[in-house]
Amino acid sequence: MITLVQMDESTFQFFMKQSTRDYAEDKIKTGAWDAETAMKLSQEAMTRFLPKGLHTEGAYLYSIVEAETQTQAGYIWFNVNESRGVREAFIYDIYVFEPFQGKGYGTRALTLLDEEARKMKVTKIGLHVFGQNDRAFKLYKKMGFIVTDITMTKML
């Protein structure tokens, strides 16, 4: 059993380092960014989406916590906003730490996110998944997400 626990400042600092690094690495893998500028671009993106850090209005940052042991098993970050009269959430990052992967933690975290979003009167949840992340893509499809757009690249 897991719970979602609002991040504290020290957990947020860990999250920012890992998430920024992972985003840069994913952008390099897709060929969108080069290795020399990826970290700078990733840091700029994180600052743009979380200008006030943990206290950014509309941003929700949670630790995924194993309830029995109180061990952090990962994290999830989503923002909520209103667009065209619809209250929407967008998942910017979800990560389950390696020792907990393949054990249902991602499924449960997304289910808990659904519950949180409903409490916030959210009616739609979106996300982006990198093309090479087949494991995440399968999880999202299993959890009821549908493909709304596909961008493809061919390297020459």
Image: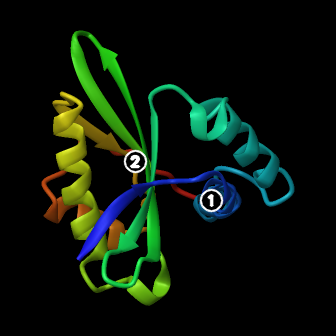
Mark 2 crowd level (few <14, some 14–19, many ≥20, 10 Å Cα): few
At a point 40% along the width and 57% down the height, the residue shown is 5
Classed neighbour count for the residue bearing mark 1: other residues with Cα under 10 Å, few (<14), some (14–19), many (≥20) = few
Image quadrant where one finds the N terminus? bottom left
- Front position among marks 1 and 2: 2
The answer for how far apart the CA atoms under marks 1 and 2 are is 25 Å
Q: Nearer the viewer, residue 57 or 133?
A: 57
**x and y percent of residue 23 in the render?**
61, 56
In the rendered view, tell whether residue 136 sits above or below residue 124: below
Q: Is residue 85 above or below residue 55?
A: above
Residue underneath mark 2: 128
Residue at the farthest right position: 36
Q: In screen coordinates, is 128 left or right of 140?
A: right
Q: Amino acid at mark 2?
A: His
- SS state under label 2: loop
Q: Residue at x 37, y 83 (%)?
A: 101
In percent of the image, x 45 and y 89: which residue is there? 99
Name the foreground residue: 86 vs 155: 86
Name the quarter where the C terminus is drawn: bottom right
Residue 142 visible? The answer is yes
Q: Do the numbered discs 1 and 2 sit on residues whose CB atoms are within 8 Å?
A: no
Task: Return the mark for residue 51.
Answer: none
> x%, y% of residue 17?
71, 60
Write down the residue under mark 1.
156
Q: Residue at x 78, y 53 (%)?
A: 39
